[in-house]
Amino acid sequence: MHTRRVTSRGRRRVRTLSRLAAGAAVLAFATGCVVNSESTVPPGDRVTVEKVDAIARQLPPDIADGGTLEVGVNVPYAPNEFKDDDGTIVGFGVELVHALGDVLGLEAVLNEADFDRIIPAVQAGTFEMGSSSFTDTKEREESVDFVTYYSAGVQWAQRTGESVDPDNACGLRVAVQTTTIEDLEEVPAKSEECVARGMPPIDKVKYDSQDEAANALILGRVDALSADSPVTAYVIARSEERLEPAGEVFDAAPYGFVVAKGSPFGPVLQQAVQYLIDSGAYDEITARWGMEDGAITASQINGATS
């Protein structure tokens, strides 16, 4: 999961390819490569929500008085967080953040940052919230709190027609995005199992973005790709049938918005997420981005199971 990084990029995503293709448009290919394009943004305006005074009045004064919600985000990680052709940060997670701003009567201000700097910035008070497909884990809960908003897993991809088994990938070259859960935990654990069985380790190949990892797979520089399930599905749906799933989605875990440990903002944010769920706005947003498969019905503070 894009558990993005240890400060981990919790990223896991789940999505059927047909809905992804219909709900979000197309990653453009040039000379066999995949790049983000404005066409990946669903048509129409984002889902908007009215302010909910009963929730907004519970905001800590330092946030309420400022009128803005400073959010740390890292791109690209389509379909969750990426830039359109105009350079605007968009995506499923981004639209949720703006809707939460609506509920709280705040303007959500997206601050682009390196993934591994977002959690420290939340701890330092530079950002009130981190939103970058962070996977909620017990380890991370020791330093920050998470407000859950989605459930995703890990999904591998392979070139169409090839046969890659994620549970038996010893000796293969596997692309991952740097500092994701796949980079830090999932692929290394599989590699250690290979060595323990007397097999060659997995050759983990790290890339700065998922676009680069996908291109490497398409061009034959690696044998497989491991990423959060929504990201893998998104890439596959836009690969012009060059890529396909390798195995099933596994290790499902919650995504969470990051807030400072013990912050009074956490319970307010959790109420705002739950309001979006209960009001139907959450379902509208997940449908717009083709993310229904990982939708949740109840938001929690610190919902990690491992």
Image (cartoon, helix red, strand yellow):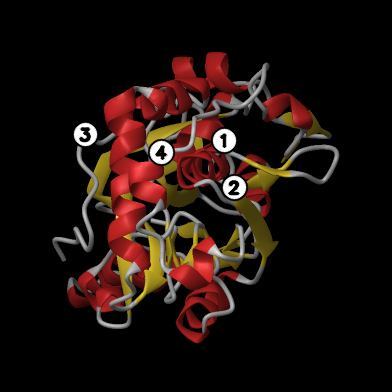
Q: Is residue 296 left or right of residue 116?
A: left
Q: Looking at the picture, which amino acid does disc 3 mark?
A: Thr
**Disc 3/disc 1 C-alpha distance (Å):** 26 Å
Q: Residue at x 56, y 42 (%)?
A: 98
Residue 187 visible in the snapshot: yes
Disc nearest the viewer among 1 and 4? 4
Could you tell which of marks 4 and 2 lies nearer the N-terminus? 4
Q: Is residue 117 above or below residue 14?
A: below
Residue 72 or residue 278, whichever sits in front: 278
Which residue has dot 4 on it? 52
**Disc 1/disc 4 C-alpha distance (Å):** 36 Å
Q: Is residue 10 above or below residue 214?
A: below
Disc nearest the viewer among 3 and 1? 3
Q: Looking at the picture, which amino acid does disc 1 mark?
A: Val
Instruction: Answer few, some or many: residues within 10 Å of disc 3's Cα (few below 14, many 20 plus, some between 14 and 19).
Output: few
Give the image location of residue 85, x and y in percent: 83, 37
Could you tell which of marks 1 and 2 lies nearer the N-terminus? 2
Residue 230 or residue 58, whichever sits in front: 58
Q: Is residue 280 left or right of residue 23?
A: left
Which residue has dot 2 on it? 81
Residue 304 or residue 122, whichever sits in front: 122
Q: Tag on residue 227?
A: none
Q: Looking at the picture, which amino acid does disc 2 mark?
A: Glu
Residue lying furthest bottom in this view? 124
Labelled pair 1, 4 in contact (Cβ < 8 Å): no
Residue 237 or residue 280, whichever sits in front: 280
Q: How many marks?
A: 4
**Disc 3/disc 4 C-alpha distance (Å):** 19 Å
Residue 154 visible in the snapshot: no
Secondary structure beneath disc 2?
Answer: loop
Which residue has dot 1 on it? 235
